[in-house]
Amino acid sequence: MTDLSAPAWLDDARPKLRQSVRVGPALLKGTATVHFVAEADTQAYLQVGPREAFLMGRLDGSRSLTEIGVEYAERFGRRLGVEHWQQLLGLLGSRGLLDPADPGLLADVREKAALARRSEGRTPLLWRLPIPGAPDLVPPVARAFGWLLRPIVAVPLTLVGLAVCAQVALNWAALYASLGEAGSPWWVTALGLLISWITIGLHEFGHGVACHRYGGRATQIGFMWRFPFVAPYCKVDDIVTFAAARHRVATSFAGIYVNLLAVLPFAALWLWGPASGWPHNLATTLLLFGTVTVLVNLLPVLQLDGYHMLEHATSTIGLQSESFRFAGAFLRRGPAGVRAYPRRARWIYTAYTALSAAVLGPVLAWLGAVWFGTLDDLWGPVPAALVLAAEAVLVVVFLTWALRRRRAVRS
């Protein structure tokens, strides 16, 4: 057996990552920079630092460890000892990332990764119910409709869809009033709800198709409870390994793009179809729903598509939680509390915190005022204030308990 402690081994060894391994780009996470490593066969993921990612990117079988060590020293200003190589290669080997890999080890890693996916995302605020076999539908859908994602097609359709949503938003009051005045039979409402749910499902498939286009795969498709809503979802974990930020942004935008496509036929029906009757009412309903869906998803302060687009555009991970952690450190200790953050991180987290406050502050104040006014009309100002305060305390207690439980599950 080769003596790993012998320096000559570094000259001879030329380890190689398996072809199915992909090392992702640098992503900002708090004060650190991380890379995600994905293995396509086992669908397992590993988070590493810049130094490990640098080394893994050079394990292609053509360089000896000594040669890679020289490159590492030039980049990071220090040489790696044999024990460091032992630790790295031991880690990679134990996860089946080196070529060749034992089939039994790969099966074990695959089973553990599947178990982790089933157990994650199960908190009082978030619960996922994956549909078995649903991700296997993405490749054939991508082959049939992937052409819609070509820039020459997607850009003009996106602009037309945004123009339709802008017109609906500008004329919202008139459209909503006309819908209320006309009225519709119950089956038109039911048809509208059915089409809306189908659109939401296609929205999620859009993420999967875009992920497939850029070399990834959808790992889960199913239904998700995200307090306080139930909706379809699609997990595209491979997105964190896409080297180009534009591909990550496009994958996150793909769901909104589907919504923009969905409003086009209903806009045509509203403009050129009957000026009254159930088809007109159905078109109006779905135009209103589609516009709300697009606008809500674009909001960067909710953890929806717009938020993830901003995350990937800034090459960050956990943008919201890290921004709030950054703000908390600044409030507790002032500039000294955030001195460890890189300059780029300070700019990004400060900007996102300010954006969140600018958007959520007025919204929460408006909701509080509306709810207080409703309670005031029912019971008077003092009981209304007491109920509002009690509800605020309960929400804070519940969210604190849920977040602590989530951290405990993750740890």
Image: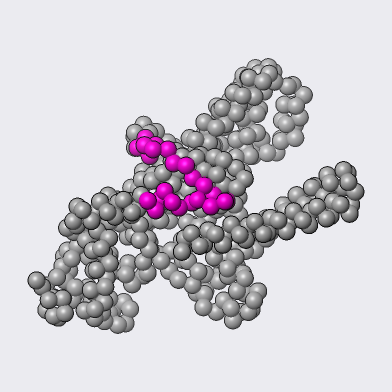
* Left or right of 381, for residue 251: left
Q: Splitting the image into 4 quarters, where does residue 327 fall?
A: bottom right
Does the image show residue 197? yes
Q: What span is colored magenta in the figure? A: 115-138
Give the x, y percent position of residue 287: 62, 31
Q: Is 44 in front, or is 333?
A: 44
- The quadrant of the picture occupied by the N terminus is bottom left
Residue at image position (79%, 47%) is 371
State whether residue 154 is above or below residue 327.
above
Q: Is 365 in front, or is 174?
A: 365
State whether residue 180 is above or below residue 207.
above
Q: Splitting the image into 4 quarters, where does residue 27 fall?
A: bottom left
Judge whether residue 122 is colored magenta.
yes
State whether residue 328 is above or below residue 261.
below
Q: Splitting the image into 4 quarters, where does residue 112 fall?
A: bottom left
* Left or right of 59, for residue 165: right
Residue at image position (57%, 65%) is 323
Give the x, y percent position of residue 113: 35, 53
* Left or right of 149, for residue 285: right
Give the x, y percent position of residue 398: 65, 56
Judge whether residue 148 is colored magenta.
no
Does the image show residue 365? no
Residue at image position (30%, 82%) is 78
Q: Is 150 in front, or is 293?
A: 293
Give the x, y percent position of residue 226: 57, 47
Residue lying furthest left:
1
Q: How is the image coloured?
A: one colour
Residue at image position (25%, 63%) is 94
